[in-house]
Image (cartoon, rainbow, N blue to C red):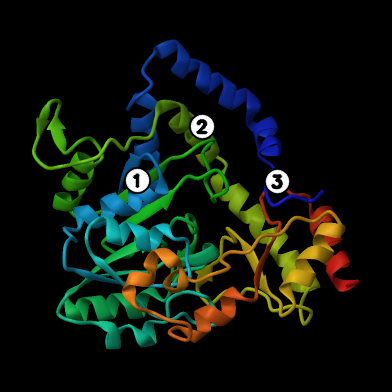
Amino acid sequence: MIKLADFGREYNLLKNEIDKELQIVLNSGAFIMGKQVGELEANLSNYLGYKAFTVASGTDALLIALRAASIGEGDEVITTPFTFVATASTITFVGAKPVFVDIDEETLNIDPKLIEEKITDKTKAILPVHLFGHSADMDTIMKIAKKYNLIVIEDNAQAFGSVYKSKKTGSIGDISALSFFPTKNLGAYGDAGAVFAKDDGICERIDMLRSHGSRRKYLHEIIGYNSRCDAMQAAILNVKLKYFEDFIERKRKLASIYLKELKDIVLLPSEKDDCRHTYHQFTIRVKDRDNFISYLSSNEIQSAIHYPLPIHLQKAFGYLGYSEGSFPVAEMISKEVLSLPIFHMLEEEEIYKVCKIIKNR
C-alpha cells in the first residue's frame, strides 16, 4: 500500500535524536512551557522573521490571531470558501462574520480580483489561505488591505516553508497562524500550533491570550485561553526543524516526478513564478473522481479529497444565506480535486509506481 502518510518512516529516521530529547523532557519534569518550548519559539522566530508564540493547535492559532487583532462582534472577515473549516469557524468563534470570495481556478486560493466588491464598513480583515502549500497573491491582497486599512491574517497552516516573491509565507501580513498537525509540512506527533506577528502590541496580546489572559500568574487582564504547546511536542519539533528544508526539497523533487509523468493526463497543480510550492498536498483534478479513487484503491494507492464540500454549503454555515451557485469556481473544484501520496519519506520508485498505474488506467 502506498499511503498518504506514514509517520513510522520519519520516526525511524530520527528515532535516536527524538528519543534522546524526549528523555530529557521526562527527566526534567517540566512538561508545560518548559525549556524546549522557548527554544522552539526562538527557532521558529529565526526561521520566519516574525516573533513566534506556540499554542495548542492550528485552530487555536487562528482563533488567537483573530482575537489579538481585536476582531469581534459585528466585524466582517473576508476569506475563501475552499479551505478547512477552521478558517471560517474561528471567525464565528470571535463573533465576527466570514464573508467568502470565490477562488482562482489555477492556484485554488482566494481570487484577489473579487475582494474589493465584498468590502463594507464592517470589514476588519482579510484572511487568505495558502492552500496545499502555494501562496495566495499577497501583493494584491496587501495593496487592498492598505487601501482600506484592513488587517491581513495569513492562514499558513498548509504552507510553512513556502515562498512568495522572496518572502516566506506567514511573514507578509500582520499576523499568521500555523498548524503542527502531524501531516503538515512541519508536523508534531500530536496537536500543536503557532501564531506569528511583528507588532509589539499584537505580540503582547497573543502571549496573554494563550495563557488565560495573563502576563503574571493569577493576574488576568483579559479573557484568554489555555492554549499551550507542551514540551514533548516542542522537543520533537526542534529535532524536525533541523531537517525541515531538506524535507521540503525532498517533497518538491517527488512532486517534480508527478508533474513530468502526469503531464497532459490529469490537471496538475501549478507553481507561479517567484513562488516556492511546498506541496503539503499534491492535488490533481479529475472529472470521474469516484471511479478514479476506486481504481487507485484497487491498486493499493491511498488518496483523499481536500475538500469535498465548500464551507458556504456546509450545514453549519447555512445561517450565512449562501446557496449553490454562490461561488461557482470553488464548487466546481470541490467536485474534481483529489490528493495523491506526497509525504517526504516516500521513495521515488513509489511515485513512479503511482504515475504508471494512473497512466495505465
Q: Which residue is mark 2?
A: 236
Q: Nearer the viewer, residue 353 or 51?
A: 353
Residue 273 x %, y %: 53, 77
- Name the N-terminal-most of marks 1 and 3: 1
Image: 164 above or below 350: below
- Which amino acid type is marked by label 1? Ser
Q: Is residue 29 above or below residue 112?
A: above
**Disc 1 versus disc 3: nearer the observer:** 3
Residue 231 appearing in the image: yes
**Is the Cβ of the residue at disc 1 closer than 8 Å to that at disc 3?**
no
Q: Is residue 175 above or below residue 234?
A: below
Label 3: how many Cα within 10 Å (few below 14, some 14–19, many 20+): some
Pinpoint residue 47: horizontal percent, then vertical percent: 41, 48
Residue 92 drawn at (x, y percent) = 29, 61
Residue 175 showing in the rendered view: no
Looking at the rendered structure, the secondary structure element under dot 2 is: helix
Three-letter code, disc 2: Ile
The CA distance from mark 2 to mark 3 is 17 Å
Dot 2, crowdedness within 10 Å: few (<14), some or many (≥20)? many
Label 1 packing within 10 angstroms: few (<14), some (14-19), many (20+): some
For this view, does 319 lie left or right of residue 346? left
Q: Mark 1 sits on what residue?
A: 45
- In terms of image quadrants, where is residue 319? bottom left
Mark 2 vs mark 1, foreground winner is 2
Q: Is residue 129 left or right of residue 149?
A: right
Residues 25 and 309: in front is 309
Dot 2 or dot 1, earlier in sequence: 1
Is residue 224 shown left or right of residue 342? left
Which quadrant of the figure contains the C terminus? Answer: bottom right
